[in-house]
Every structure is written in structure tokens, then in C-alpha cells.
């Protein structure tokens, strides 16, 4: 696999998908975009578990690009070490004890055993971290508590992957938004809208769609939310733990953007407990 890290403790199971091998030029662009250093030094040795299983739609390029970026950022900055898996057995409590955060990279329609669900809830509520990338919110339709942890459920993507969309900073001075230099930005990506349990009442929204942009605000087909609240990234607390979610990351081009990778690294360090940031609602 292109990202070069371990894929988890068990490899004998039947895989749902095979992650594509990205072209060397693409891998080089991801590596060039990765931050040279972390904003803060890890308070202790950290390890993350990156889970990429899909039972629904398979974002092959997004998974490959995200996995490679996560591996490179950890090695280059020393912020964490990373293991990668698509095997549900990694969510056994004894195995989760080795990790400081779990990253759901473009997972879809997961079918977690009940024991895994409880282990994950205990993991984050006990003080660890959860990170969701793009399709992670397309994962827990039959597990309301899991959907509530991540903060929402996918409800379509009116802003398609072929478009370039505008984004605004909901909290310009928030430390996790330093990647954007205090300014909104544009990016080619597929952007989600969310349904319940999405709410602004229990989190700090960091990014959302900028509907003042003609192309972005002009999208009407498939738009369901009448409140025009199209959040893209947020942080929240879950018990003693921390959650960071961002819907950017449909395909590998997103992980070739240096600001996106800085944003993800900072969000991961927040989830790990190393980068302090306010997650309270505004």
C-alpha cells in the first residue's frame, strides 16, 4: 500500500476493497504539501489508528491520498505514529488501548459489532480522540450514539466533486483555523450537507460553505436545508474526549493542498490532546 504503514494486527480477513496505488507524481505532491513541523510538540509519544473500511461507496482516491498524507505527516513532524486497518477487530478494547485517537478516513455504512461500538464510546469518553475525514459521516446510520459522536449524518452532496467551491471561516481567530491565514478560500471537492444529529448547539463550527460566492450559493438541486447552514468542519467534546471532523477529502487532489494538510494535522493534534482549542459552541 502506498502509504507504507502497518495495516493493523489482522490481515487474513476478506477485504471489502483494495486501495488504489497512486501515481508517483501524486504521492510526491502530497509529500510536498505536508507540513514540515507540528504547531505544538506532542506531550508524549502518540499513536493513531486510521480506519478506512467501506461497506457503501468507496472513495478509493480519497482513502489512498488521505492515508498517505496521514503517514507522511506523522513521520515528518513526530506528532504521532500511525497504523492503518479495515478490519473491525481493531476495535477490541485491548487493542484500542494502544492508541490516542482513531481516524475514520472516508468510511461508509460501517457495520460495527456491538462490542466495538461500546469500546469506541468508552475510548473517546474516557479522554481519547476521534477524527472524521469526509465520508466518515456516511457511516453510522444504525448507530445513533456513533453518529452523535461525529456530529452529523450525510444527507447528500449538492456541491459535486467537479466543482470549485468557496468556504468561509466561522471562527477566524480559532487556533485550528490558522492554516487559512484568516481568509476564506476555494477548493475543488465534493461538499456534504448534514442532517440530524447535526446541530451547532454542542460544537464549535470552524468552516462552512460561503454562499455569497455565486457558484457556491447558486447550487439549488438537491439542497435540503432551509436554514442555509452548511458546515464543513467542527470540533466538539465527547465526555472527557475530543472530536474533530472535516468533510474535505473526496479525492486525492485535496490532500495535495498544503493548507488542508495543516488543518488536518492541527485537528488531529487537538483530538490527541496536544493542541489546546476551544470546542464550546458560540
Image (cartoon, rainbow, N blue to C red):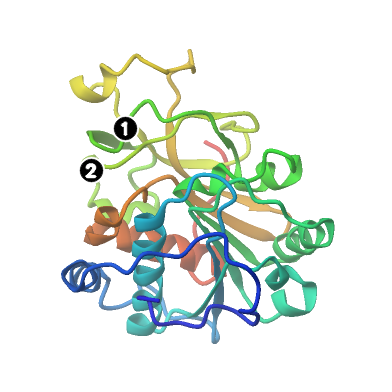
Residue at left offset 37%, top offset 84%: 75
All told, the count of numbered labels is 2
Quarter containing the N terminus = bottom left
Decide which of 256, 11 is in the foreground and name it.
11
Evaluate whether residue 175 shows in this view.
no
What SS does tag 2 mark? strand
Q: Is residue 220 above or below residue 238?
A: above
The image quadrant of residue 211 is top left
From the viewer's perspective, is the residue at label 1 or at label 2 nearer?
1
Decide which of 9, 94 is in the foreground and name it.
9
Decide which of 210, 41 is in the foreground and name it.
210
Tell me where residue 218 appears, x and y as whole percent: 25, 16
Q: Which residue is mark 2?
A: 187
Residue at left offset 67%, top offset 60%: 241
Residue at left offset 83%, top offset 56%: 114
Q: Earlier in the sequence, mark 1 or mark 2?
A: 1
Q: Which residue is mark 1?
A: 160
Evaluate whether residue 62 shows in this view.
yes
Outermost residue, left side: 25
Residue at left offset 24%, top offset 21%: 212
What SS does tag 1 mark? loop
Q: Is residue 77 left or right of residue 231?
A: left
Q: Is residue 43 above or below residue 60?
A: below
The image quadrant of residue 267 is bottom left
Outermost residue, front side: 14
Answer few, some or many: residues within 10 Å of disc 1's Cα (few below 14, many 20 plus, some between 14 and 19). Answer: some
Numbered mark located on residue 78 in the image: none
Tell me where residue 225 appears, x and y as whole percent: 49, 18
Amino acid at each position: 500500500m502506498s502509504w507504507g504503514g502497518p495495516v493493523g494486527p489482522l490481515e487474513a480477513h476478506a477485504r471489502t476493497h483494495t486501495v488504489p496505488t497512486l501515481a508517483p507524481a501524486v504521492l510526491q505532491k502530497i509529500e510536498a504539501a505536508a507540513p514540515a513541523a507540528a504547531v505544538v510538540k506532542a506531550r508524549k509519544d502518540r499513536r493513531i489508528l486510521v480506519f478506512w473500511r467501506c461497506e457503501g461507496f468507496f472513495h478509493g482516491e480519497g482513502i489512498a491520498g488521505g492515508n498517505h498524507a496521514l503517514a507522511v505527516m506523522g513521520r515528518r513532524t513526530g506528532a504521532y505514529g500511525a497504523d492503518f486497518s479495515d478490519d473491525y477487530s481493531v476495535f477490541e478494547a485491548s487493542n484500542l488501548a494502544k492508541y490516542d485517537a482513531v481516524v475514520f478516513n472516508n468510511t461508509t455504512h460501517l457495520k460495527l459489532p456491538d462490542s466495538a461500538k461500546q469500546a469506541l464510546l468508552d475510548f473517546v469518553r474516557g479522554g481519547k480522540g476521534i477524527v472524521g475525514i469526509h465520508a466518515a459521516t456516511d457511516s453510522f446510520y444504525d448507530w445513533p450514539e456513533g453518529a452523535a459522536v461525529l456530529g452529523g449524518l450525510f444527507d447528500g452532496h449538492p456541491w459535486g466533486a467537479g466543482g470549485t467551491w468557496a468556504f468561509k471561516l466561522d471562527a477566524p481567530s480559532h487556533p485550528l483555523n490558522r492554516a487559512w491565514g484568516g481568509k476564506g478560500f476555494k477548493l475543488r471537492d465534493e461538499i456534504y450537507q448534514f442532517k440530524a444529529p447535526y446541530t451547532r448547539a454542542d460544537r464549535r463550527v470552524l468552516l462552512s460553505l460561503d454562499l455569497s460566492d455565486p457558484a457556491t450559493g447558486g447550487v439549488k438541486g438537491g439542497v435540503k436545508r432551509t436554514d442555509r447552514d452548511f458546515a464543513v468542519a467542527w470540533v466538539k467534546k465527547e465526555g472527557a474526549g475530543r472530536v474533530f471532523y472535516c468533510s474535505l477529502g473526496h479525492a486525492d487532489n485535496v490532500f495535495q493542498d498544503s493548507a488542508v494538510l495543516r488543518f488536518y494535522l492541527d485537528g488531529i493534534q487537538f483530538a490527541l490532546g496536544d493542541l489546546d482549542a476551544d470546542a464550546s459552541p458560540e
